[in-house]
Amino acid sequence: MAIERTFSIIKPDATARNLTGAINALIEKAGLRIVAQKRIRMTREQAETFYAVHKARPFFGELVDFMISGPVVVQVLEGDNAVLKYRDVMGATDPAKAADGTIRKVHAKSIGENSVHGSDAPETAAIEIAQFFSGNEIIG
Ligand code: ADP
Ligand code: MG
């Protein structure tokens, strides 16, 4: 299996409840390495760019407002098959449908305030990582 990188965000609902460490423990328990991490406050422009693919969806405005409502922790995760592995660790978008033991099942509040983001493919991971990190900030 190939060593991959994926992009993760610990969202404002999770930072508000002091869950950064609990979520990082689930990430590390799954064998993913946190090779870059910083706590930031996203600007509206950053959030709109990041979620541009969802611009036409009815929840877009609510999603952007939520993502800028508090601090987030942006991360680069590295490991075998990291993109798909992290999607498994996160669980389904809607916590009501997420598998037992997943981050969203354990911690998410709702389909919108669902605690974490993870890239959906290696190509989007590369774009998302580049939006928030320069190469010398990622130490594998
Ligand atoms: P995922 O984060 O699992 O990849 P999507 O890419 O489909 O999910 O959606 C991006 C984010 O938009 C979700 O994580 C969630 O925060 C929000 N979202 C998705 N669907 C809804 C919805 N029906 N209502 C409110 N927010 C939503
Ligand atoms: Mg997505």
Image (cartoon, rainbow, N blue to C red):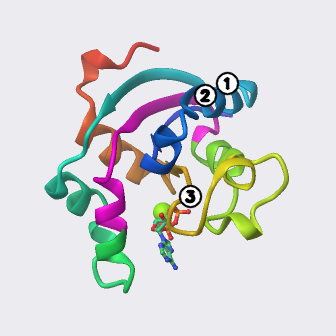
Residue drawn at (55%, 50%) of the image: 115
8 inside magenta stretch: no
Residue reaching furthest to the front: 17
Q: Which residue is mark 1?
A: 28
Give the left or right position of residue 73, taking residue 40 as reference.
right
How packed mark 3 is, by other alpha carbons closer than 10 Å (few <14, some 14-19, many 20 or more), is many
Per the model, the C-alpha gap separating discs 1 and 3 is 19 Å
Give the secondary structure at mark 2.
helix
Give the left or right position of residue 23, taking residue 98 as reference.
left
Residue drawn at (64%, 39%) of the image: 81
Q: Which residue is mark 3?
A: 114
Q: Could you say which quadrant of the image residue 37 lies in?
A: top left
Q: What amino acid does circle 1 point to?
A: Glu
75 inside magenta stretch: yes
Q: Is residue 121 above or below residue 95?
A: above
Do callouts 2 and 1 mark residues in contact (Cβ within 8 Å)?
A: yes
Residue drawn at (60%, 66%) of the image: 110
User: Ligand 1 within 8 A of label 2's CB?
Assistant: no
Q: Could you say which quadrant of the image residue 109 lies in?
A: bottom right
Q: Nearer the viewer, mark 1 or mark 3?
A: 3
Residue reaching furthest to the right: 100
Q: Position of residue 114 (x, y in %)?
A: 56, 58
Do callouts 3 and 2 mark residues in contact (Cβ within 8 Å)?
A: no
Can residue 35 be seen by looking at this rendering? yes
Q: What amino acid does circle 3 point to?
A: Asn
Per the model, the C-alpha gap separating discs 2 and 1 is 6 Å
Q: Which residue is mark 2?
A: 24
Q: Earlier in the sequence, mark 3 or mark 2?
A: 2
Give the secondary structure at mark 3.
loop
- Range of magenta residues: 63-82
Q: What amino acid does circle 2 point to?
A: Asn
